[in-house]
Image (spheres, rainbow, N blue to C red):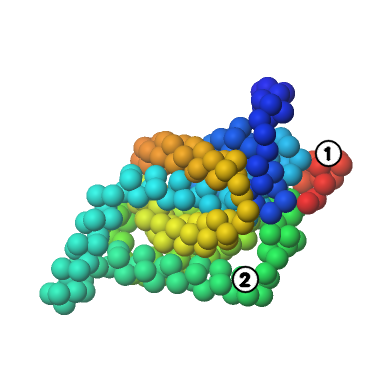
Amino acid sequence: MIALLDALIAQTPAADVSGPAQINLVQAIVLGIVQGLTEFLPISSSAHLKVVPIALWGRDPGVAYTAVIQLGSIVAVLWYFWKDLTTITIGAFKAITRSDYDSQEFRIGLGIVLGTVPIVFFGLLIKILIPDFDKSPLRSLASIAIASIVMSLLLAVAEKTGKRKRDYENLDVKDGIIMGLAEAMALIPGVSRSGSTLTAGLFLGLERAAAARFSFLLGIPAITLAGLVELKGAWGAALGIDGIVALIVGTISAFAFSYLSIAWLMRFLQTQNTWVFVWYRLAFGVAILTAIAGGAVKNQ
């Protein structure tokens, strides 16, 4: 499979999409698939979008490119949860006009708004304090591996101890704030936005499907803002027609596979537990550390 990809890549002209990374159409499709399959599963899209390209092609596409193709994921989650979003928005406005602040729609809407504040605040703080975050040690393979292992252990504890007695109808503003704080942890590559929020939801006593559903809704503002900020920077660069096409192709690929992964995960968590993700993340982290220790890859 890797040999086939390399053969195809060799026949496709490269395009400069983000900084030094040369992204061509085949690579854009592959990265879109990786983004789509990992953005909403609790296994960290940022980790896989660094590890997979390094494993296949020996280079990291960079933060800017991966943030832009996340826009495909946001379109997918908007499409999938459009009914929920319209219900929350309309219900929240009606609740405000009636001063009905105990309304479920108002509580969930306010929870999403307040829950978005931590990741925006800390994201801006990182932009200011670490302008070259793309080259930060936090984006090293070892850091990603350690984050993956730690989060797998936290998810295991949450799965083991979570009461899972509260459904989506019982969500409160407090849930949004706490899960929002957990979401901010995902600014560290390897943590996983969906993984940290799902873990927090289980600790709060939510059912698995309810925690995942709110995690998706909570992620909409954060993913959208990140994608738009980086899109502005990428658009201002001298991409050329090949670079623009590669961005579009990667985004479309991310949209298609994001929608499929959302639909699958929502069905899966209605009847299954999260142990498969615990073991996957643990194995993922250990495999990276083993490869680094053995000299198979550099800790870049």
Vertical relation: 93 (above or below) 170: below
Amino acid found under the numbered disc labelled 2: Ile
From this viewpoint, is residue 152 visible?
Answer: no
Q: In front here: 240 or 84?
A: 240
Residue named by callout 1 = 296
**Residue 188 percent location from the top left of the image:** 62, 61
Vertical relation: 105 (above or below) 258: below
- Assign a secondary structure to mark 2: helix
Q: Residues within 10 Å of mark 1 (few under 14, many from 20)?
A: few
Question: In the displayed structure, does residue 163 sit left or right of residue 183?
Answer: left
Residue named by callout 2 = 126
From this viewpoint, is residue 66 visible?
Answer: yes
In the picture, the quarter occupied by the N terminus is: top right
**Residue 129 percent location from the top left of the image:** 66, 75
- Assign a secondary structure to mark 1: loop
Q: Residue furthest bottom?
A: 99
